[in-house]
Image (cartoon, rainbow, N blue to C red):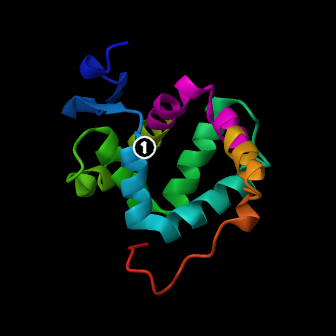
Amino acid sequence: MDLANYSPTRRDIPLGAAGTLSVRGLSLADVSLLVEAHQNSLVAAYASFEQMRGQAGSDDTTLFATLALGLVREAPQVAADIIALAADQPHAAKGAANLQFPVQVQALIAIASLTFEAGGGLGELLAALRSAGRGIGIEIEAKTLPKPNPTSRRKS
């Protein structure tokens, strides 16, 4: 594959009369921006995801839906920023926040699918991260995530 000409796979999310919203999976740069801006909210959303994941199925579609609902519930601004980044419109988070709830969930599920499908799915990524963490003496579980620093300059 020629990286100079790489273009990520995109999915169109129907917006009714307004047309469609084209989204792609998140890159490491996108994730870094999200963590920088929303560390506290992401920790809460991940803890919520881990709690709901125990009650959900283990297939990727169910995991992605659980992740999307956790973000919408615990961190709606993060959800809007994810949608804006994945649409390559990082300054349009306010517009993403104004999308109808079902459209936001559909977009988040598509973004999660596009983000994780190349690596074997979300379950494979979590297993790989846990394995890598154990290799350097870190247990990666929701209950062991670092506590947010209230004096941090990061937005939550």
Left or right: 74 with respect to 80? right
The relative height of residue 1 versus residue 134 in the rendered view (above or below) is above
x then y, percent, for residue 100: 36, 47
In magenta segment, residue 46: no
x then y, percent, for residue 27: 40, 39
The relative height of residue 119 versus residue 122 in the rendered view (above or below) is above
In magenta segment, residue 126: yes
Q: Quadrant of residue 10?
A: top left
Quarter in which the C terminus is drawn: bottom left
Q: What's drawn in magenta, residue-wise?
A: 110-127
Q: Residue at x 54, y 32 (%)?
A: 116
Chief secondary structure of the magenta portion:
helix
Q: How many marks?
A: 1
x then y, percent, for residue 5: 25, 18
Quarter in which the N terminus is drawn: top left
Specify the farthest residue to the top: 1
Which residue is under mark 1? 28
Left or right: 137 with respect to 40? right
Left or right: 86 with respect to 62? left
Specify the farthest residue to the bottom: 151
Work out whether residue 1 can be spotted.
yes
Work out whether residue 80 can be spotted.
no
x then y, percent, for residue 118: 53, 24
Q: Residue at x 42, y 43 (%)?
A: 28
Label 1: which secondary element: helix
Query: Which three-letter amino acid code belongs to the residue tagged 1?
Result: Leu
Q: Quadrant of residue 77?
A: bottom left
